Structures are given as structure tokens and as C-alpha cells.
Amino acid sequence: MNRDERDLRDKLRRIEALFAGATTPGERMAAAAAMERIRGRLRDAEKVERAQEFKFTLADEWSRKLFVALCRRYGLSPFRYKRQRLTTVMVWAPKSFVDGVLWPEFQALSRELQAYLQAATDRIIREEVNQDTADVGER
């Protein structure tokens, strides 16, 4: 595992800790405890409000994979109806959990993942194909 990947993993853990409400450095390092706190928030939300069906349309395969993994991490069961596009993900969850935890955490994690993938792509192209990775000019 290279330094960039380690940095990405550390950022992802810090983001998870932020959404779990961690208050001490020890808690931030305890990913299992953070995940359980978020699952507890989901259970609490399910007690006071009904789950609703949400439709998410994600821009690319990487975002979809990240979102599906995040849903599964919290015990949600993402799915797709027949004939829906591969970029569509459906999930039943309480609105407060989606708005307060799931979607904001996904957005934060997605930003970090996209930045990492962009940097890795640029580096590989620069090293293996051509030094010039600038966008095309306009005419």
C-alpha cells in the first residue's frame, strides 16, 4: 500500500469518525465503535419515523460502488428495480438518517475518493503515456 492510499484510508476513517460524533482521538481511531454509533442512530430513527424509499442516481461506477458499500455497512439493503439503469440505487431508510448521515457521509467520502482517483489517473498517464495531461484546447 503506497503513501497516497494510506492517506486516503486515513481521511476516510476521519470522515467516518466525524459523522459518528467522535469526540476524542481514541474514538476517531475506533472505526468499529464509530460504525456502531451510526447504526444506533439508524435504529433510533427507525423507532420514531417510517422508512421511505429513496432513489439515488449516481454519476459513475465508483460512486455507485461506494454508495452501495456505505448502505450495506449500516445494514441497509440497496437494490434496483428491473429495467432501472445501473447508476440507479434504491434504498429504504428513515429520511432523517439519509439527510443527516448517509448522504452527507457519502458526499464527503466520494470527494476524497474522486480526488484520489483523479490524481492516480493523472500520474499513471503522465508516467506511462504522455507527460501532457492538460485538457484539450478550445477552438
Image (cartoon, rainbow, N blue to C red):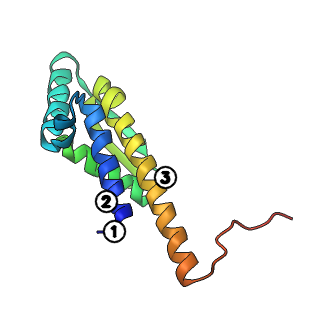
Q: Nearer the viewer, mark 1 or mark 3?
A: 1
Which amino acid type is shown beneath numbered disc 3? Ala
Q: CA distance from mark 1 to mark 3?
A: 27 Å
Q: State the residue in front, 88 or 6.
A: 6
Q: What is the x, y in percent for residue 27?
A: 17, 35
**10 Å crowding of disc 3: few (<14), some (14-19), many (20+):** few
Q: Is residue 80 visible in the rendered structure shown here?
A: no
Q: State the residue in front, 14 or 80.
A: 14
User: In the rendered view, would you say 17 is above or below 134?
Assistant: above
Name the residue at the front extreme: 25
Helix, strand or loop at mark 3:
loop
Q: Residue at x 23, y 18 (%)?
A: 49
Q: Residue at x 13, y 35 (%)?
A: 36
Q: CA distance from mark 2 to mark 1?
A: 6 Å
Which quadrant would residue 71 be assigned to in this image?
A: top left
Which amino acid type is shown beneath numbered disc 2? Arg
Helix, strand or loop at mark 2:
helix
User: In the rendered view, would you say 94 is above or below 3?
Assistant: above
Residue with the mark numbered 1: 2
Q: Are marks 2 and 3 in contact (CB under 8 Å)?
A: no
Q: What is the x, y in percent for residue 104?
A: 38, 34
Name the residue at the bottom extreme: 128
Q: Which mark is residue 59?
A: 3
